[in-house]
Image: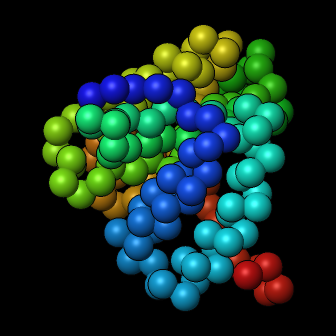
């Protein structure tokens, strides 16, 4: 496997991986199409300026897995009392024919190392049911976060 950093030309790949990730988790095609269009416009400038970064794995030139990363502003917190940001992991995706080979595990290790390289000592992610065992096996733990969809915010 070849591993490289994401760049702006990966826009379509990242959008496809994100949509497929949510489809695997039970997302409806209509909602996913709407989300992907909005996500594409959100992602484009962030890929260009480097505020969205990450890695892609390729097999013989064909991309087969990817991971997105961000640094998010967050006030100092007991889990990171001296830092005002957190790492955020998103869009972890491995093509179905390449699953169960340790690719997601390798991407997560790269992500953790990249956050450390950037001076971040605390990171979060939102796990699908399929992804949760992987993250737990790497030492990630559940938090007390809760969420609610508000009227007019769909």
Left or right, residue 115 beside residue 44: left
Count of marks placed on residues: 0
Q: Position of residue 125 (x, y in %)?
A: 53, 45
| Viewer-proximal residue among 37 and 133 | 37
Q: Quadrant of the C terminus?
A: bottom right
Instruction: Say whether residue 63 is left or right of residue 145.
Output: left
Judge from the rendering whether residue 29 lies leftward or rightward of residue 93; answer left or right. Answer: right
**Quadrant occupied by the N terminus:** top left
Residue 76 visible: no
Where is residue 77? Give x, y as percent: 74, 30
Look at 45% across and 78% down and name the residue there: 27
Describe residue 105's horizontal placement relative to residue 33 as left or right. Answer: left
Residue 136, quarter of picture:
top left
Q: Residue at x 33, y 43 (%)?
A: 62
The quarter of the displayed image where residue 115 is located: top right
Residue 8 vertical position relative to residue 138 in the rendered view, above or below: below
Q: Nearer the viewer, residue 5 or 102?
A: 5
Place of residue 150 in the rendered image (x, y in percent of width and height, measured from the top left): 77, 80
Vertical placement of residue 50 versus 31, above or below = above
Residue 120 coordinates in the image, percent (x, y): 66, 19
Q: Residue at x 24, y 57 (%)?
A: 96
Q: Nearer the viewer, residue 150 or 105?
A: 105
Scheme by which the image is coloured: rainbow
The answer to whether residue 99 is visible is yes
């Amino acid at each position: 496997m070849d591993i490289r950093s994401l760049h702006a030309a990966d826009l379509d790949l990242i959008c496809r991986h994100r949509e497929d990730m949510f489809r695997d988790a039970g997302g409806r095609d209509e909602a996913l199409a709407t989300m992907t269009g909005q996500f594409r416009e959100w992602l484009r400038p962030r890929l260009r300026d480097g505020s969205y970064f990450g890695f892609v794995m390729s097999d013989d030139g064909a991309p087969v897995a990817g991971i997105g990363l961000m640094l998010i502003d967050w006030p100092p917190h007991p889990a990171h009392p001296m830092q005002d940001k957190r790492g955020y992991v998103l869009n972890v995706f491995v093509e179905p024919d390449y699953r169960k080979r340790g690719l997601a595990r390798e991407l997560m290790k790269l992500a953790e190392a990249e956050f450390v390289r950037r001076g971040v000592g605390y990171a979060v992610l939102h796990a699908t049911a399929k992804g949760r065992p992987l993250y737990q096996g790497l030492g990630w733990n559940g938090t007390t976060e809760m969420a609610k969809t508000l009227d007019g915010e769909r």
